[in-house]
Amino acid sequence: MVRLLVILLLAAPVCGAQQARTNPFHGSAEHIDAGRATFRIYCSPCHGIRAEGGNGPDLTRGVYEAGDSDANLFDVISNGVPGSAMSAFGGRMNENSIWRIVAYLRSVTQNEPPVVAGDAARGRRIYEGKGGCSGCHRIAGKGGRLGPDLSRAGRTLSLARLRESVIAPNESIASGFDTVTVMTTAGGTIQGRQINIDNFSAQLMDSQEQIHSYLREEVRSIESAPRSLMPSYADALSAPELDDLLAYLVSLRGN
């Protein structure tokens, strides 16, 4: 019992230091700029160029699944998240670089939750009906496969990013969803999104979700363009309909 008490007393200062860790670069414009540059190199492929989400979560909300303190953010960047696509960056950058990323994330954190003017129930009807969104996107395992899965859209993308994806889909395309055009040696042309392209074969999905597979010797050229297969809904939906659709997308939080 005495031995256990000694161990606990010795451990207490360590735990306190762990909780009290603060960012030495918090609020420094110089270090925030450096953190922004590092973020765009290492983090933006998943979290978006402005940290508003993509394949990874929106990081501008200031509320995170692994904890909300600067120390929590530092640990996630350094150690990664087991069982997720978030890998550890502690071996690729030093502590100061990680703290600068944390400082940058704090600089883009929204102090207030986004205000969504629309109605989610009406938005769901637009999603499934007039918008035809379910033909290309999946939610909870139901829907098409041509576009990104939206089951967690409200968690992974900011309201601004969601709006942009609906009215200007070419501005920021999710990784792996660029438009790919394959021209075959037989004279055929197939356009869709890339499934896999390597040194031996090429597979892509066309707009009808048909999978096309070719050996490399059957392919004359492959062109990948920063263009989305998704059309713009800027003119297809009225402003109230767009607000309703966004309200529904924001409500999608996954499990």
Image (spheres, rainbow, N blue to C red):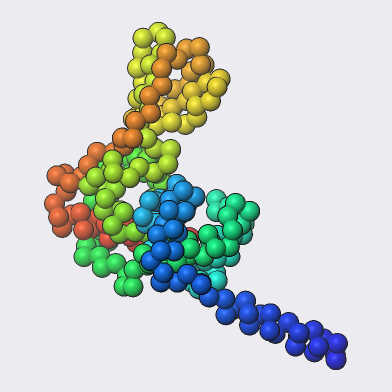
Residue 144 visible here: no
Closer to us: 218 or 6:
6
Image point (80%, 89%), residue name: 5
Image point (34%, 30%), residue name: 225
Q: Quadrant of residue 145?
A: top left
Closer to us: 157 or 245:
157
Residue 29's spot in the image, x, y percent?
38, 66
Q: Is residue 156 left or right of residue 232?
A: right
Q: Is residue 3 above or below residue 109?
A: below
Tag count = 0
Q: Is residue 173 left or right of residue 80?
A: left
Q: Is residue 227 above or below residue 128?
A: above
Image point (26%, 53%), residue name: 163
Q: Is residue 143 above or below residue 110?
A: above
Residue 108 visible here: yes
Residue 98's spot in the image, x, y percent?
53, 61
